[in-house]
Image (tube, rainbow, N blue to C red):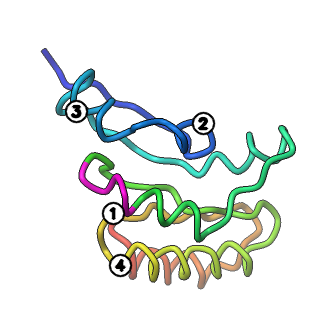
Amino acid sequence: MRPINILGSFHYFRRQPLTELLTTRYPGCDFLADSGAFSAHNSGAEVTVADYAAWLREHAGVINAAVTLDVIGDPAATARNTDELARRVDGRVPLVPVFHVNSPWPELERLCAEHRY
């Protein structure tokens, strides 16, 4: 049986016992974390880099990689968030940076040089 792949949102899983859930119900799963900022925004909630990073560190043992907290239409803010998240996570979870259309090309080159994904 192939392991299950899960894309999970911090916004929805932040109050769940994620490590326990994944190790008991889905052992060996490949869990890709996303901030869920878009869903949070649409429901009137907020996702901060500090909260997302703390959650990633807490569940680093079951999270295979995490998508950064991007800001659609603002590549500078996305870059700041990515750099701050990387600093706060301190290598415990590989980050997947986000590059949006119309962002400066040198930023894509920087992200490719600095991140595995």
Q: In the picture, residue 112 is in which quadrant?
A: bottom left
Which of the two discs, 3 and 4, labels the residue nearer the N terminus? 3
Residue at left offset 29%, top offset 68%: 92
Q: Which is more foreground, mark 3 or mark 1?
A: 3
Give the residue pinned by disc 2: 12
Q: Position of residue 70 (x, y in %)?
A: 67, 63
Near-viewer residue (109 or 84):
84
Give the residue pinned by disc 3: 23
Q: Are marks 3 and 1 in contact (CB under 8 Å)?
A: no
Q: Position of residue 32 (x, y in %)?
A: 40, 44
Q: Is 52 colored magenta in this rendering?
A: no
Going by the numbered disc 4, the residue's amino acid type is: Asp
The C terminus is located in which quarter? bottom left
Q: Are marks 3 and 4 in contact (CB under 8 Å)?
A: no
Q: Secondary structure at mark 1?
A: loop
Q: Mark 1: few, some, or many residues within 10 Å (few <14, many ≥20)?
A: many
Q: Position of residue 8 (x, y in %)?
A: 49, 37
Which of the two discs, 1 and 2, labels the residue nearer the N terminus? 2
Q: Mark 2: few, some, or many residues within 10 Å (few <14, many ≥20)?
A: few
Give the residue pinned by disc 4: 90
Q: What stretch of residues is rendered in magenta?
A: 57-61
